[in-house]
Amino acid sequence: MRMFLTGNHAAAYGARLARPQVIAAYPITPQSPIYEKLSEWDGQGVLGARMMRVESEHSAMAACISASLTGVRTFTATASQGLALMHELLHFASGMRVPIVLVNVNRSMAGPWSFWSEQTDSLSQRDTGWLQFYVADNQEALDTVIQAFKISETVLLPTIVVLEAFYISHFMEPVEVPDQRLIDEFLPPFEPPFKLDTDNPASFCQVVSQSQYAEFRIQRHMAMEDALEVAEVVDREYRERFGRGYGLLECYRLEDADTVLVTAATIGSTARVTIDALREEGRKVGMVRIRLFRPFPKAKLIEALNHAKKIAVIDRNLSPGQEGVFCEELKSALYSRINGIPVFGFVLGLGGTNVSPLHIRKVFDIAEKMNDAPLKPIVNIEDEDALGI
Amino acid sequence: MVPPNRAVLNKSEPLTAVSFDTSLIFKTGSQRAERPVFVNKVAPCCHACPIGIDIPAAFHRASRGDIDGALRIYLEENPLPGVCGRVCYHPCEAECNRGNFDESINTRSFERFLSDRGQVAIRTGVPVHSRRERIAVIGSGPAGLSAAYHLARSGYHITLFEAKSEPGGMLRYGIPSYRLPRPILDREIERIHSLGIQTRLGATVGKDLGFKELESFDAVFISIGLQSGTTLFETDSPEGDILTGLDFLADPQRWSLEDDTQKTLIIGGGNVAIDAARSLLRLRKGKGGNITVLVPESRDQMPALPEEVKEALEEGIAILNGWAPHRLHRGNGSPFSLDFCRAEVKRDEESGAVEIIRVGEKIQKYTADRIIVAIGQSMKSDNLPEGIEIRQGKIVTDRFGRTSLPKVFSGGDAIGGKAFVADAIASGKMGALSISCFIEGRDVETAFETHQIGSSQTFSFQHFIEGPQENSVDLKRVVSFDQINTLFFSGAARNNPDELEPEARKKTGEEVSCGVDPARMDEEICRCFRCGTCSDCEICLDFCPDISIIRDAQLGIYSFDADYCKGCGVCSVACPRGVIEMVGETR
């Protein structure tokens, strides 16, 4: 059924269609509409899940871990400070191999207080052992939540699906909401290989020896690497069933492109407009939008960027003292295989500031005019003198 | 569909730490920086009790249905629970921690309940008469009975001398039977005598037999009380129409019954004045329109127990406060005419001395047929041993009851201090400690401080004669309200005793208070927090996250498992009654 939905409500529909049995969450701007929509369904008796209203995000994640250990499908949603408060338990969740799905609405971290889109909250969770998807529109939000359950339950690792604050969470778009019966066929009930079971008592997550710990860590990493393939297979199956798939990367007009923009989330959908216009002018430009950030699809990126002469990266985040995280990760991926392609790192859109088609045009202009990529990120695209062009 | 991959294939292998075996290999006790200590402590009621009774321990026994055991705990310190359960001024109730929560526990009614229902053999430290020393106790009021009782429990031979024809002192000759029925008093005295105490009634030491004749005794305890009422006027008037309160109470029948129309004026604000008024009312079968009590103190300042004043007013006795006698005339129609002036009373908190101050010039005239004067008591000092130091009409002693004479000790009203029954009993107990130490050649100060309850004026005689026992109370630690975990208690109203209706009781002279009925006493027993006394509630067991509290099923005492207790302190916080505390680990 086609509905006119905000990104938050699209994610809530995705969660509901997946038939989770436990949802433990805590409201926070700009995620609250997800929580409210689920609560509304709970009140109407149509949710089908046990909704746990807890006193903090820390408790929400603790409840999700425990619930998931009993073998039930588990969902939660949060944003920004809430995700930061969960941090300790995010490590527990992946270490305990529980396939929780979490929707995080990207919001800038305080202080100072700010509520707009920025990716620092989720990127700060890079090393917690969770899969991370960054989506570009509301439809993709719904579809990715459903895919995430299937991927997570296969590799037994939890997944964060990232929606940008307001650009996705609060903007309304037409969204195709799949039929429940078809989703049930795509996503069978969760059956974990081991679970908390009072008939077969066991203790979970006890102290282990140094070597056992090391083994579990390597095992978790292997599962994460497996997830690359699993994510691709699940996405392909989803496309076959529902006619929509996204890949691990979105490759846009890459054929014979000399200058390629690499970015994530909604900047990617904006960039399509700019690229179409530049192509009309005869400029050879294209784009790679990174949809899956963890595990990082290195091989796919190398393959996609193999023929590019210049790469420009736009990050809506900044790791202080280094550069944008996507840019850094990309360089790390390329270094072993492709040498000599200059990578221009741009940091734009911090604090939810707008990255318009004109901004993106300017990024292409600068990348084409400059020969050597600077060591520092480019944060000001208006001052050409300072850039030496 | 999803192709085979490592993650899927690995599902049969453990993916995370899961143990189907025991985790006892991890001795988490090594993480402990503090350990729990289970120590019974003193409750504030016990600390406030002049006699130092371990009240919460008795409540705990009673809560288990062991009424005899509860009474036994009372008898470890107090030989007269039936008396105190009726007439005590119950300072325990004022300090009760439950008073900060809803209402204090009705401790006095509990004591009465135990004494009326319990049957128990007295616990002695050593067998009766196991020591050869002999001790004379002179005076069988509460102080003398208490000294005799505790010394007899300590194995001494006791001879109790009583000038009157029956034992009990003020308990018998001062407190009216509607407050303390004589069968109760007789039963309690009989229990004390069962310890093999010899009693010589009608024997006034210093008159009927001299102190010289007591020289064969190893020690003498003088507890002769203050037997004489203080007089304002010539009380031995030929007509017998002016009496002291004490003389009247000792023999109320001396005024014939047919004079129920006669106007009687009682002067004084203490228990004796109120007792005299209420006794007279009962002699007149309840016709009391002509009984008036004139009190120098304000209503709030009156030394009489508030409940006594309340009951007297209910019975129709007029109490006029703030008046002092000024001049007495013999009248014509009525025998007396008295002038009263407005008065205020100042009491010196240190010495207890009272000063009555006239206020203003106003004079009020009263006429009366008879007068009872109840404004104080004094000692008959003509029967005391030669050379004993007396000051301001009281025998001089140190705080352990030692007089200026060797071998001679004293206690009760004769040495001053508070004039209540419980204080007299406490004073007798102190005398017993002092005499024991004197005979055994021990330092009484050390003995007192060792067994002193908190910072109070009293000590535990039970600890003194039996020494520290397994799991016994740490006498120095008093449990405050903030150590009570009130989350484990719900509000419940205090259960008060029923009373006879004023119209009924003043005609019959029966005991006014009926006590709390047994069903409601059960509720009252449940209300007690049992501050500082482990009640076996097992809340520590429930809360311990390491399952490391160990209960000794036979002794009912608790300890902790040193191998696994991490010292988190949850048990100490959870304990409803302040028994568990954390102390630094010394490993």
Image: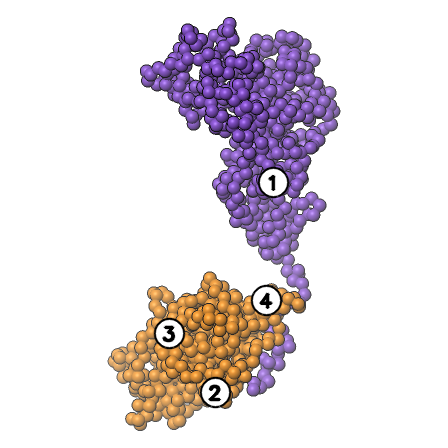
Chain colours: A orange, B purple
Hey, which quadrant is residue B210 in on the image?
top right
Which element carries disc 1, helix, strand or loop?
helix
As helix, strand or loop, the secondary structure at mark 3 comes to: loop
- For the residues beneath circles 3 and 2, the answer to whether they share a chain is yes
Contact, mark 3 vs mark 1 (Cβ under 8 Å): no
- Alpha-carbon span between mark 3 and mark 1: 67 Å
Q: Please provide percent x and percent y for residue A175.
A: 41, 82
Residue type (three-letter) at the residue carrying disc 1: Ala
Upstream in the sequence, badge 3 or badge 2? Answer: 3
Q: CA distance from mark 2 to mark 1?
A: 75 Å
- Asked if marks 3 and 2 touch (Cβ < 8 Å), the reply is no
Task: Tell which circle, 4 or 2, labels the residue nearer the N-terminal end.
Answer: 4
In front: label 2 or label 1 = 1
**Element at label 4:** loop
For residue A165, the mark is: 3
**Which circle, 3 or 4, is nearer the viewer?**
3
Of the residues tagged 3 and 2, which is closer to the observer? 2
* Residue picked out by circle 2: A242
Chain-order first, disc 3 or disc 4:
3
Neighbour tally class for label 3: few under 14, some 14-19, many 20 plus, Cα within 10 Å: many
Mark 2 belongs to chain: A
Q: What is the chain identity of the residue bearing mark 1?
A: B
Residue B380: x, y in percent? 55, 11
Name which residue lies at 65% across and 52% down: B561
Does the residue at mark 2 contact the one at mark 1 (Cβ under 8 Å)? no
**Amino acid carrying mark 2 in the image:** Phe
- CA distance separating discs 4 and 2: 39 Å
Q: Are marks 4 and 2 on the same chain?
A: yes
**Few, some or many residues within 10 Å of mark 4 (<14, 14–19, 20+):** few
> Mark 3 to mark 4: distance in Å?
35 Å
Distance from label 3 to label 2 (Cα)? Answer: 27 Å
Q: Is residue B334 left or right of residue B150?
A: left
